[in-house]
Image: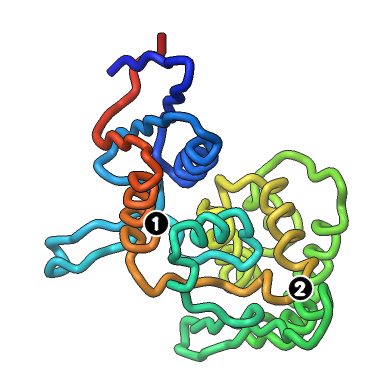
């Protein structure tokens, strides 16, 4: 469709998290807002769908974990009343199973200040050898202390620092995918470094992973549509923007 912008109307293209948040801000500022979304749902990459292959189970797409440092996204969930729909610990606390079936726990103690809590977690993480622990700790310390991070991918950085194997498989790779929702070979190293600084250089709760208890449709998409409608935002799903006059 083609949309014409009036003197008091704003057309927002895309109903992902940024588009949803923008609609809230504009509507609360008094604008008439029309939200156009090409797909049949809101939420962008964070959505769920019913899978016939799994007997009608609702399956999530997009991020399967968040970190506590996502202040802006948590504020959006607060607008929707769904921030409590997550399991989360007071600090980073994860368990990994290796190829032999052994379980290794990565725990950053909340009683220690940053970044000592992460260092303690790495040094006691049984999935890594002593050499891998040392290389990982030094690499993370250098990365989070730098003010200017050179361009490149997280995968390039892992190879350059000799962090393939255990560090990539059990720690840095999962963190990259959880924080950026992007594989290491595609993820931006500067963005990854910024996210690590935000997560691990503050209170320990910032590094804790948040796991949704409910499918994304009930955490984000459906609540957002209802809340926006209550604010007078016109939501047009299945509508692709082709041009603006």
- The picture places residue 243, in percent across and down from the top left corner, at 37, 14
Q: Residue furthest bottom?
A: 102
- Based on the displayed image, in which of its 4 quarters is residue 152 positioned? top right
In front: 12, or 186? 12
Residue 8 point in image, percent of width and height: 47, 21
**Residue 176, image quadrant:** bottom right
Mark 1 vs mark 2: give the one in front. 1
Q: Residues under labels 1 and 2: Cα distance?
A: 26 Å
Q: Is residue 221 left or right of residue 178?
A: left
Residue at x-position 40% and y-position 53%: 46
What residue is drawn where x is 49% and y is 57%? 79
Mark 1 — residue? 220
Q: Is residue 220 above or below residue 85?
A: above
Residue farthest top in this picture = 245
User: Relative to residue 103, is residue 211 depicted above or below?
Assistant: above
Give whichever of 229, 135 is nearer the camera. Answer: 229
Query: Disc 2 marks which residue?
Result: 203
**Residue 44 at x, y percent in the picture:** 40, 45
């Amino acid at each position: 469709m083609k949309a014409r912008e009036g003197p008091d109307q704003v057309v927002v293209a895309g109903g992902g998290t940024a588009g949803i948040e923008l609609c809230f801000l504009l509507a609360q500022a008094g604008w008439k807002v029309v939200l156009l979304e090409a797909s049949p749902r809101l939420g962008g990459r964070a959505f769920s769908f019913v899978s016939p292959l799994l007997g009608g189970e609702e399956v999530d797409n997009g991020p399967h974990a968040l970190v506590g440092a996502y202040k802006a996204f948590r504020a959006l969930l607060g607008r929707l009343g769904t921030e409590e729909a997550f399991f989360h610990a007071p600090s980073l606390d994860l368990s990994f199973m290796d190829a032999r079936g052994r379980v290794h726990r990565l725990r950053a103690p909340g009683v220690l200040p940053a970044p000592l809590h992460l260092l303690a977690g790495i040094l006691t993480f049984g999935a890594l050898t002593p050499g891998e622990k040392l290389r990982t700790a030094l690499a993370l310390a250098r990365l989070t202390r730098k003010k200017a991070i050179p361009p490149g991918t997280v995968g390039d950085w892992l190879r350059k620092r000799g962090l393939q194997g255990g560090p990539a498989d059990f720690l840095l790779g999962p963190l990259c995918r959880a924080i950026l929702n992007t594989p290491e070979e595609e993820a931006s190293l500067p963005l990854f470094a910024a996210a690590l600084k935000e997560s691990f250089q503050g209170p320990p709760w910032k590094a804790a992973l948040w796991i949704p208890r409910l499918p994304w449709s009930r955490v984000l998409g459906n609540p957002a549509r209802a809340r926006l409608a209550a604010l007078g935002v016109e939501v047009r799903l299945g509508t692709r923007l082709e041009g603006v006059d």
